[in-house]
Amino acid sequence: MDCIFCKIVNKELPADIVYENENVLAFKDIHPKAAVHILVVPKIHIESINSENSENIVGDLILAAKNIIKRDNITGYKLLFNIGREGGQMVDHLHMHLLAGNPS
Ligand code: AMP
Ligand code: ZN
């Protein structure tokens, strides 16, 4: 399957990985829209929030984000999902944007 986030999960494509656990990988967005712009993705391929059972996985993503912000002393942040092409989703592997700080 030609999925860039699967390739990053499988370490076939380089990424600036900032967090990893059994279910989740987090890495810096290549085109950051804030001082902190991290993408948190499930290790399994699932397309979007619209996919069946995505809500279980979303809990893992949020838990990972909470671990990251605690570790990095981030006090205020945004969590964002783009869903579907018309919702701004460009990569069809479920991902959550973690944004914090000023645009850079
Ligand atoms: P979305 O529009 O929600 O699908 O967001 C996709 C995000 O992935 C965008 O913010 C891109 O900058 C980011 N992105 C695309 N390719 C890569 C990559 N190889 N490494 C890191 N981030 C990427
Ligand atoms: Zn994938």
Image (spheres, grey):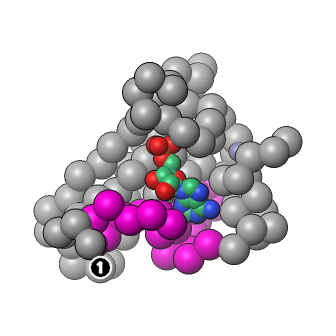
SS label for mark 1:
loop
Ligand 1 closer than 8 Å to the CB at disc 1?
no
Q: Kindly identify the residue that appears in the image at 33 percent across and 43 percent down.
A: 80
Of residues 96 and 32, the one nearer the viewer is 32
Residue 23 picture quarter: bottom right
The structure residue drawn at horizontal position 70% and vertical position 53%, both measured from the top left corner, is 4
Where is residue 101 drawn, in percent x and y? Answer: 18, 69
Residue in view at x 43 percent, y 42 percent:
59
Please report the bounds of the magenta region as a residue range. Answer: 15-38
Locate residue 27 relative to residue 44 in the image: left or right. Answer: left
- In the figure, residue 93 lies in which quadrant? top right
Q: Magenta stretch: residue 32 in it?
A: yes
Percent coordinates x, y for residue 94 in the rendering? 56, 40
Residue 71 on the magenta segment: no
Say which amino acid is labelled 1. Answer: Asp
Q: Would you name the residue on which mark 1 appears? A: 72
Between residue 90 and residue 54, name the one nearer to us.
90
Is residue 66 in sight in this rendering? no
Image position of 28 (left or right of 5): left
Residue 102 located left or right of residue 34 = left
Image coordinates of residue 26 in percent, x first then y, are: 51, 64
